[in-house]
Image: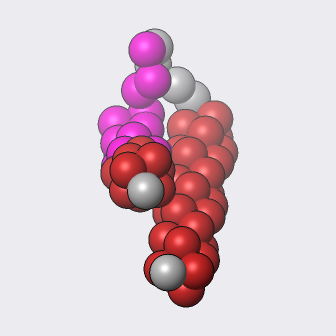
């Protein structure tokens, strides 16, 4: 159960990291704008995926009880 909540927090972290990469165009080094947008977009999408997967697991575990 704790893993599902941790996955939610991690998903939120990925979304925030994606926004930071897009805004500041920086990820360990200065990025070109096109690469920053692509990388930030992928990080945001992955964060959304992790949150969706965690919510689905939380709902399944509460349905089983």
| Number of numbered discs overlaid on the protein picture | 0
Q: Main secondary structure of the magenta part?
A: helix
- Residue at image position (43%, 56%) is 1
Q: Residue furthest front?
A: 65
Residue 46 in view in this figure: yes
Q: Residue at x 54, y 72 (%)?
A: 61
User: Which stretch appears magenta?
Assistant: 12-28
When asked about the image quadrant of residue 35, the answer is top right
Q: Quadrant of residue 26?
A: top left
**Above/below status of 38 relative to 8:** above
Viewer-closest of 52 and 2: 2
Residue in the picture at 57% in, 29% down: 32
- Tell whether position 35 is magenta: no
Q: In percent of the image, x 52 and y 25: which residue is there?
A: 31
Residue 36 drawn above or below residue 13: above
Residue 61, compared with residue 33, is above or below; it is: below
């Amino acid at each position: 159960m704790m893993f599902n909540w941790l996955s939610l927090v991690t998903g939120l972290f990925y979304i925030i990291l994606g926004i930071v990469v897009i805004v500041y165009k920086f990820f360990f080094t200065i990025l070109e704008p096109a690469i920053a947008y692509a990388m930030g977009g992928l990080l945001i999408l992955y964060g959304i995926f992790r949150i969706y997967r965690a919510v689905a697991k939380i709902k399944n575990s509460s349905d089983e009880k």
